[in-house]
Image (cartoon, helix red, strand yellow):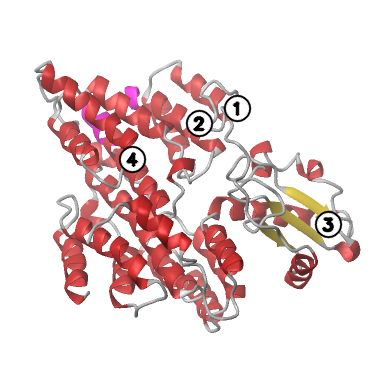
């Protein structure tokens, strides 16, 4: 049931898969679809909105004239969207304001613009009075769209300071900096440059075995996110500098290592990858084989190497859990598009799955399912496949970190069950190849625990 992804996606979009219900136009649904996959931009806009409201309180009802008035509380990168375009801010009468991103096509005034403001009623009225034009081809891609490693930032300067002396304290600080940076998204994410610099600084300071597992973990996370970008047809916008850095480090530091060969072979044979990504993994494999390179003798595994990856679980007090679950129940009572934004904000505020406590996962899973219920079914299915790819990547990373046994499976199970049990949607014939391909891939994935593989195998039988 497999078919070329580019053909299926093009057909999927060309058939107007975005159209949902009689009252929803193709253009509106396309805007909803593209906007849903912009969590980083929405997060930044929410941050800007909070700071505008804080400014208004501190200045007795006066709004900032421009975003420059917030420069003392926000970084310059906070005023850029995922596509490295400035976020616009406009003030209107009666203390109304609009925050606006030009969206994936990087052209202001088109259907994929992301718009927010203080009063939803005013925002909707403004949208109706300023209808968008059709999406164009967008602006040409910049040569420096992915930020260069030499770009000076406060964080990169701090990283270089920590690199001057290799100590356990500096290693711990570098790891803390790395983990604090966001996962890349399909865009010219400004922080990805810093994350790559942090990886290059951190990896060589670790004991060999830990460094290898750390790099393999980073690679698994990045490949999961890249698969997610492919399913939303944004793989060309996904920054690949960290993938390249991890591949180069592993190839140079651990030539012909059995675990590195296992990982590289898996990704080189993965037909979800683009040809240039596959080549990055195939090239060292071919070189090692042609030159008959032998693996270096395995170094002794340092005691407590797993502790390097472990972060303290965030224990949530029962009262806080009850409060958050009450919020989810309230917002999910009415399955409307208006409730999607506050649900998405709550979801984004939760910690990553790898460090989530049981209560965090309860809130996270219920919030995600509530978000799906506010979306057209075909969009919900595609969003779930993208989220599933990212979660599987994180689970692969946990395998290399030696903690896949206690990795929270709640969200993976919930998404798999939703996809397996959901009724047919509009354009199901175009969605089904993606679902079948994903379930088959995960059901045969030896890197996944047996219980997870079984979940996908049962889903295939149900289909």
Q: CA distance from mark 4 to mark 2?
A: 22 Å
Dot label at residue 274 = 4
Q: Which residue is mark 1?
A: 153
> Mark 3 or 4, which is nearer the eye?
4
Dot label at residue 193 = 2
Name the quarter where the C terminus is drawn: bottom left
Which region of the structure is painted magenta?
Answer: 203-214
> Mark 1 or 3, which is nearer the eye?
1
Residue 233 picture location, percent across and down: 44, 51
In this view, 122 is above or below 249:
below
Q: Are marks 1 and 2 in contact (CB under 8 Å)?
A: yes
Q: CA distance from mark 3 to mark 2?
A: 34 Å
Q: Could you say whether the residue bearing mark 2 is in a helix, strand or loop?
A: helix
Q: CA distance from mark 3 to mark 4?
A: 48 Å
Q: Which residue is mark 3?
A: 56
Give the main secondary structure, helix, strand or loop, of the magenta stretch. helix
Which one is nearer the viewer's eye here, 445 or 131? 131
Q: CA distance from mark 1 to mark 2?
A: 10 Å
Label 1 crowd bin: few (<14), some (14–19), many (20+), radius 10 Å: few
Q: Are marks 3 and 2 in contact (CB under 8 Å)?
A: no
Q: Earlier in the sequence, mark 3 or mark 4?
A: 3
Label 4 crowd bin: few (<14), some (14–19), many (20+), radius 10 Å: few
For residue 366: magenta? no
Q: Earlier in the sequence, mark 1 or mark 3?
A: 3
Left or right: where 316 falls relative to 168: right
């Amino acid at each position: 049931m497999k078919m070329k992804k580019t053909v299926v996606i093009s057909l999927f979009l060309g058939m107007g898969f975005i159209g949902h219900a009689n009252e929803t136009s193709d253009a509106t649904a396309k805007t909803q679809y593209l906007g849903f996959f912009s969590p980083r931009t929405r997060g930044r806009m929410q941050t800007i909105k909070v700071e505008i409201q804080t400014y208004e309180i501190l200045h007795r009802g006066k709004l900032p004239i421009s975003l420059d008035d917030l420069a003392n509380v926000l970084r310059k990168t906070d005023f850029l969207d995922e596509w490295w375009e400035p976020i616009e801010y406009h003030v209107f009468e009666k203390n109304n304001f609009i925050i606006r991103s030009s969206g994936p096509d990087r052209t202001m005034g088109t259907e994929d613009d992301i718009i927010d403001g203080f009063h939803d009623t005013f925002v909707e009225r403004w949208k109706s009075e300023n209808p968008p034009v059709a999406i164009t081809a967008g602006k040409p891609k910049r040569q420096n769209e992915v930020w260069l490693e030499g770009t000076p930032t406060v964080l990169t300067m701090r990283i270089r300071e920590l690199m001057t002396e290799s100590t356990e304290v500096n290693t711990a600080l570098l790891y803390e900096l790395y983990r604090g940076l966001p996962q890349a998204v399909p865009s010219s994410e400004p922080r990805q440059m810093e994350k790559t610099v942090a990886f290059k600084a951190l990896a060589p300071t670790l004991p060999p075995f830990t460094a290898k597992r750390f790099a393999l973990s980073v690679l698994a996370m990045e490949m999961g996110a890249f698969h997610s970008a492919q399913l939303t047809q944004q793989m060309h916008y996904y920054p690949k500098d960290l993938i390249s850095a991890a591949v180069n480090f592993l190839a140079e530091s651990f030539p012909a290592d059995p675990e590195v060969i296992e990982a590289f072979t898996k990704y080189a044979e993965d037909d979800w990858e683009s040809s240039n990504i596959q080549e990055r993994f195939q090239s060292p494999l071919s070189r090692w084989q042609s030159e008959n390179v032998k693996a270096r003798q395995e170094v002794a595994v340092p005691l407590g190497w797993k502790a390097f990856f472990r972060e303290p679980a965030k224990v949530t007090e029962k009262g806080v859990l009850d409060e958050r679950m009450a919020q989810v129940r309230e917002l999910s009572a009415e399955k409307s598009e208006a409730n999607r934004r506050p649900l998405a904000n709550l979801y984004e505020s939760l910690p990553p799955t790898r460090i989530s406590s049981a209560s965090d996962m309860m809130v996270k899973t219920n919030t995600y399912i509530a978000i799906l219920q506010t979306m057209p079914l075909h969009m919900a299915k595609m969003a779930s496949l993208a989220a599933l790819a990212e979660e599987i990547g994180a689970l692969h990373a946990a395998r290399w970190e030696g903690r896949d046994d206690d990795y929270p499976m709640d969200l993976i199970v919930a998404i798999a069950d939703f996809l397996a049990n959901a009724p047919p949607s509009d354009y199901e014939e175009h969605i089904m190849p993606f679902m079948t391909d994903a379930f088959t891939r995960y059901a045969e994935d030896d890197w996944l625990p047996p219980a997870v593989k079984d979940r996908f195998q049962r889903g295939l039988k149900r289909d």
